[in-house]
């Protein structure tokens, strides 16, 4: 059986007008599927935020907004499935049990969100635990974990490795990280910690992802 790698893919790649990017990711996933079985969790990106902001201004409650974000992430998953054609499981699984069944097919599995209240980071960690993934790669808009938000502070320094408890403390400091840039969340960290899931936070870039899958030290590795 091939090793399974869970990749949380930033919703940003679905928010751009350049359709070629999606095709490039599809080619990449087919390529790496020769050495591992990718299970990809798609974020909602700017499209989800657009719908959520509109619904919030209309008075929708938070759980309904979560459900809206999940729907958009599943649409993004379908776009990637269509690009992969017969190489992918034919639709996004909607429960952990269905994901378990889908990976047994041996195909590339593309998943959107699952449960209201869970970010796609938390969802990806749960899936990594469920399918006994050898690695969880969180592909984000930044190239790793910094001591400050690199989008705001030019002097921000990147960690090559970071202890889970240190990252947890950073996430609790709202002024530093939470909501600033999408790294991880407390739920995801709890799951990673309890199952000791090998996790790396890195840039959503095909060359960087390929290096990580081959075992190179890129982005930031979470250690225990």
Image (cartoon, helix red, strand yellow):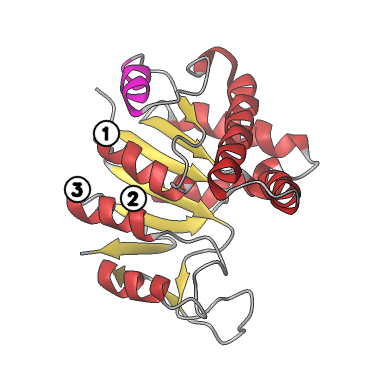
Percent x, y of residue 208: 50, 53
In terms of secondary structure, what is the magenta stretch mainly?
Answer: helix
Reading the chain from its start, which is encountered first: label 1 or label 2?
Answer: 1
For the residues bearing labels 1 and 2, Cβ distance under 8 angstroms? no
Percent x, y of residue 98: 36, 20
Kindly report the distance in space between the C-alpha atoms of the residues bearing marks 1 and 2: 22 Å
Residue drawn 62% across and 84% down? 154
Nearest-to-viewer mark from 1 and 2:
1
Viewer-proximal residue among 198 and 214: 198
Reading the chain from its start, which is encountered first: label 2 or label 3?
Answer: 3
Residue 214 visible in this rendered orientation of the protein: no
Percent x, y of residue 167: 35, 71
Residue on which the image places disc 2: 215
Viewer-proximal residue among 185 and 89: 185
Left/right of residue 57 with respect to residue 120 in the rendered view: right
Vertical arrangement, residue 83 with respect to residue 53, above or below:
above
Residue drawn 40% across and 26% down? 34
In the rendered structure, does residue 113 fall within the stretch colored magenta?
no
Residue drawn 58% across and 23% down? 81
Label drawn at residue 130: 1
Viewer-proximal residue among 77 and 223: 77
Vertical arrangement, residue 139 with respect to residue 155, above or below:
above
**Residue 168's quadrant in the figure?**
bottom left
Residue drawn 54% across and 12% down? 86
Question: Pointer 1: residues within 10 angstroms few (<14), some, or many (20+)?
Answer: some
Residue on which the image places disc 3: 195
Viewer-proximal residue among 98 and 142: 98
Reading the chain from its start, which is encountered first: label 3 or label 1?
Answer: 1
Magenta residues, start to end: 96-104
Element carrying mark 2: loop
């Amino acid at each position: 059986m091939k090793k399974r790698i869970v990749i949380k893919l930033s919703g940003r790649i679905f928010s751009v007008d350049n359709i070629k990017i999606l095709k490039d990711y599809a080619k990449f996933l087919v390529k790496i599927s020769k050495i591992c079985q990718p299970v990809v969790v798609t974020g909602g990106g700017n499209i989800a935020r657009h719908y959520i902001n509109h619904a919030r201004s209309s008075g929708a409650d938070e759980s309904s907004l979560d459900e809206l974000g999940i729907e958009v992430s599943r649409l993004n998953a379908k776009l990637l499935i269509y690009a992969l054609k017969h190489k992918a499981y034919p639709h996004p699984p909607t429960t952990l049990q269905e994901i378990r069944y889908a990976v047994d097919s041996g195909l590339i599995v593309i998943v959107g969100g699952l449960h209201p209240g869970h970010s796609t980071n938390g969802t990806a960690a749960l899936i990594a635990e469920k399918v006994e993934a050898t690695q969880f790669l969180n592909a984000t808009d930044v190239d790793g974990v910094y001591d400050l938000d690199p989008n705001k502070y030019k002097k921000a320094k990147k960690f090559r490795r970071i202890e889970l408890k240190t990252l947890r403390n950073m996430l609790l400091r709202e002024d530093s990280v939470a909501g600033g840039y999408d790294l991880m969340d407390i739920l995801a960290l709890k799951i990673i910690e309890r199952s000791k899931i090998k996790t790396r936070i890195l840039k959503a870039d095909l060359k960087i992802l390929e290096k990580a899958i081959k075992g190179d030290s890129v982005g930031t590795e979470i250690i225990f």
